[in-house]
Image (spheres, rainbow, N blue to C red):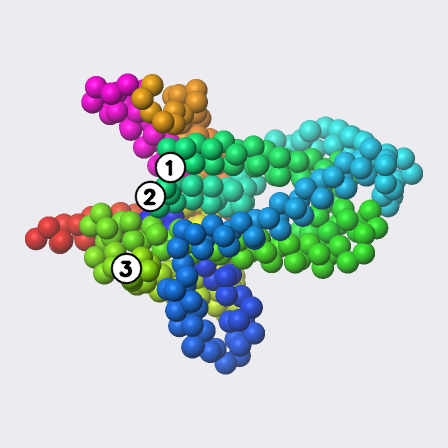
Amino acid sequence: MVNLDGGFRVGIYGGWAHYAPVVSKYAGVDLECPIYDSHFFNKRLSVRFFAEAEFWFSSIKVVAIVIFIIIGILAITGVIPIKGYAHAPGLHNLTANGWFPTGFKGVFTTMLTVNFAFSGTELIGVTAGETKDPGKTLPKAIHTTLWRLVLFFVGSIFVMACLIPYQQAGVTQSPFALVLNHIGLPFAGDLMNFVVLTAILSAANSGLYASTRMLWSVANEHMMPQALSRTTHHGVPFIALVISMIGGLLALFSSVIAASTVYLVLVSVSGLAVVFVWMAIAICQLIFRKKYVASGKKVSDLVFKTPWYPFIPWFAFIGSLLSCVLIVFDDAQRPALFYTLPIVVVCYVGYGLYMKLSRK
């Protein structure tokens, strides 16, 4: 399932990493671009490079969101004026029409999009094998990731819900830019577009790293052709990197050539595939704990213990399963389920055949 996730997501994430250099030459595609980019990552791609690039990309996002939340709170409390309000808006927009003005169904029908947005948090586990002291750093990363998600996601959504009536919320304009424009900040749209671009680069950076390392990992476990496990003297799995890059570039081109067909399928599959991955992680956690105890070891010896076990793994599994089932009731997202299930079957059958033939 991890391999499935990496293969799907690299098509979405990896392609965006080269949006500027490739699309600018789209009329006459420069074939040197992927070769040049692959050579660059061959020399530089490592945990250190990945971490440094992600640090700077993420820092821009974090600073922008923190500033947005602070400005938003000042507008909510009336410290700074906002267009359309003579007094402080407070929580009026949030409570005027109830918590679910269009019904509770909308919460579930948006889960696939939300899952797609949250995909990537599992990358903490991908980097574990190349971390000097995973026993200390990973538990810290897990805890801080949770609190950051609560602060940045919930905090920014709270601000937008307070300042934008739900009737005005749409997809034609960024809600971040809409809030800042109402407050009267100049060039708000351009600033947010820049932040979005850094977010895309951040996602591309992490997606390319993850897909490459996942391909290497499964090949190293003899579950895929051994060529994918070969590394350069820099420790970079170059062949896995090239395949990941090709997948990303093909996905990028599909967003232009076949946006309503191929690209739509890729987006749908990637959003749902990550839910399958989370379900698999939850099940693996349950099985791991059971076998760990059965082997005579103590839970107290674990460096990191899942809190509220087994409630948390089961909650994660059931919640993910519900998000898959409930999209059946949404006409716009129902095709994602029909696209994904056959691909999952093909992957499992293909894997089974490969393993069977490799044993001969």
Q: Residue 71: x percent and y percent?
A: 77, 41
**Magenta span: helix, strand or loop, mainly?**
helix
Name the residue beneath numbered marker 1: 134
Residue shown at 81% from the left, 52% from the top? 185
Residue 314 seen in render = no
Tell me the kind of residue under disc 3: Thr
Look at mark 2 in the image and give the residue it sits on: 129
Q: What whole-number distance in Å separates the C-alpha atoms at marks 2 and 3? A: 15 Å
Q: Given contact means CB atoms under 8 Å apart, are the residues at marks 1 and 2 in contact?
A: yes
Crowding near pointer 2: few (<14 within 10 Å), some, many (20+)?
few
- The residue indicated by pointer 3 is 231
- Give the image quarter of residue 297: top left
Q: Which residue is located at x 56 percent, y 53 percent?
A: 57
First along the sequence among labels 3 and 1: 1
SS for dot 2 = helix
SS state under label 3: loop
Question: Seen in the image, is 86 located left or right of residue 195?
Answer: right
Residue 206, compared with residue 115, is above or below; it is below
